[in-house]
């Protein structure tokens, strides 16, 4: 039974030049070459004919040795680490240049010397507070039950990295802290309203605002408020939100002629506390900025509702509260 000749995988020069399909076989020319009456010459295929030599180990390692250290250097095997720690050795007769390059690359994981006392700074038993925006501080507070709360009266000049700057710098930093504290006190940022007015405002908040924005825990809020441990930033922000919805009689009892002056006053206090970085509790800061979004002054104001809402979203994402949800 006759068999049909199969097409070859290599096209002829004419079809390849025209970028068309070629139907030539090993024994017959393609239809286009037969029609044109020309010789059907196959092209020389370069597929699979490249010489693939092995990677030059010497060249690769040489470039690796000259490159700056990367985290990959920390994944060296125990055998390699032992060789690095033992220091350079003289290659035996017959060893290739690879071993020389491998030894030269040991500088990438060279251990730091500790003989120089300045190589590693002086250790301190004191806890360093890195600020609200340092997420590791929040994590450490959550994991360490014995962690001492940040003392707001502690000057930044008492931190080890400030101690090295000299007494003039420490005095300058201390003076700035005193001026900042005086400015906050002048604004009344640490003042609280009369107990009767405060209770009415807090009742207003939990009646009209909390149902749609439950960003604080009711029981925890009341306990801290009665014990005087509530965050000043959070309290001023709650006052701001509550004054937007309270009765006119509460405004009068608090000493304000109109709602705008009341909300303006407590917005300025809360914003000053936020800008100064006074509050060390990241959750309290997050809760407060949600209430700062209640302030509105004019359509051209930059720090409007969307500004504070954006800050709150960013803080929540950094604390992973968007995934787990705030405590209701």
Image (tube, rainbow, N blue to C red):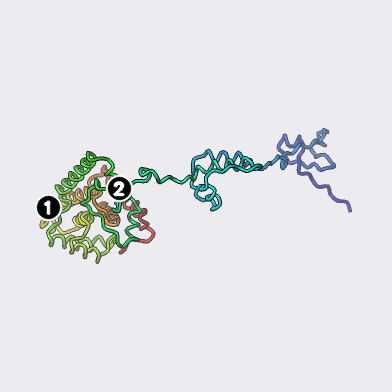
Residue depicted at 17% across the width and 53% down the height? 190
What quarter of the picture does the N terminus occupy? bottom right
Within-10-Å neighbours for mark 1: few <14, some 14–19, many 20+:
some
Write down the quadrant of residue 40 in the picture.
top right
SS for callout 2 = helix
Q: Nearer the viewer, residue 33 or 267?
A: 267
Position of residue 91 measured from the top left corner of the image (x, y, whole percent): 60, 42
Q: Position of residue 291 (x, y in %)?
A: 25, 54
Answer with mark 2 or mark 1, whichever residue precedes in sequence.
1
Residue name at image x 71 percent, y 41 percent = 47
Q: Give the percent coordinates (x, y) of residue 181.
A: 18, 47
Of the 4 image quadrants, the one containing the C terminus is bottom left
Helix, strand or loop at label 1? It is loop
Would residue 107 be visible to someone looking at this image?
yes
User: Disc 2 versus disc 1: distance between alpha carbons?
Assistant: 27 Å
In the rendered view, does 265 fall on the left or right side of 51?
Answer: left
**Residue at image location 54% in from the left, 48% down from the top:** 83
Residues tagged 2 and 1 counted as in contact (Cβ below 8 A): no
- Check disc 2: other Cα within 10 Å, few if <14, some if 14-19, many if 20+: some
Identify the residue position indicated by label 2 in the image: 307
Q: Does residue 57 sit above or below 208 in this rendering?
A: above
Residue at horizontal 27%, vertical 61%?
216
The mark tally for this picture is: 2
Residue 72 visible, this orientation: no
**Position of residue 215 measured from the top left corner of the image (x, y, whole percent):** 29, 60
Disc 1 designates what residue?
256
């Amino acid at each position: 039974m006759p068999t049909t000749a199969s097409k070859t995988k290599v096209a002829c020069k004419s079809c390849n030049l025209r970028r068309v399909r070629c139907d030539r076989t090993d024994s017959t020319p393609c239809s286009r070459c037969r029609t044109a009456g020309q010789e059907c010459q196959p092209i020389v295929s370069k597929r699979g004919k490249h010489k693939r030599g092995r990677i030059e180990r010497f060249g690769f390692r040489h470039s690796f040795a000259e490159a700056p250290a990367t985290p990959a250097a920390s994944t060296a095997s125990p055998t390699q680490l032992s060789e690095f720690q033992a220091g350079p050795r003289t290659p035996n007769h017959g060893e290739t240049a690879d071993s020389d390059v491998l030894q030269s690359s040991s500088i990438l994981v060279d251990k730091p010397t500790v003989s120089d006392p300045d190589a590693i700074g002086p250790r301190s038993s004191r806890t360093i507070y890195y600020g609200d925006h340092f997420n590791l501080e929040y994590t450490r507070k959550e994991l360490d039950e014995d962690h001492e709360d940040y003392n707001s009266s502690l000057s930044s000049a008492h931190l080890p990295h400030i101690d090295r700057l000299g007494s003039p710098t420490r005095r300058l930093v201390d003076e700035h802290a005193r001026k900042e504290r005086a400015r906050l006190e002048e604004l009344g940022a640490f003042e609280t309203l009369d107990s009767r007015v405060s209770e009415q405002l807090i009742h207003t908040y939990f009646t009209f605002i909390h149902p749609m924005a439950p960003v604080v825990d009711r029981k925890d809020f009341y306990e801290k408020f009665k014990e005087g441990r509530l965050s000043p930033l959070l309290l001023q922000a709650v006052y701001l939100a509550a004054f937007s919805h309270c009765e006119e009689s509460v405004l009068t009892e608090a000493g304000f002629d109109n709602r705008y002056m009341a909300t303006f006053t407590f917005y300025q206090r809360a914003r000053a506390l936020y800008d100064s970085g006074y509050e060390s509790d990241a959750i309290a800061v997050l809760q407060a900025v949600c209430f700062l979004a209640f302030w509105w002054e004019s359509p051209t104001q930059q720090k409007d509702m969307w500004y504070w809402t954006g800050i709150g979203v960013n803080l929540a994402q950094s604390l992973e509260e968007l995934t787990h949800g705030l405590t209701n």
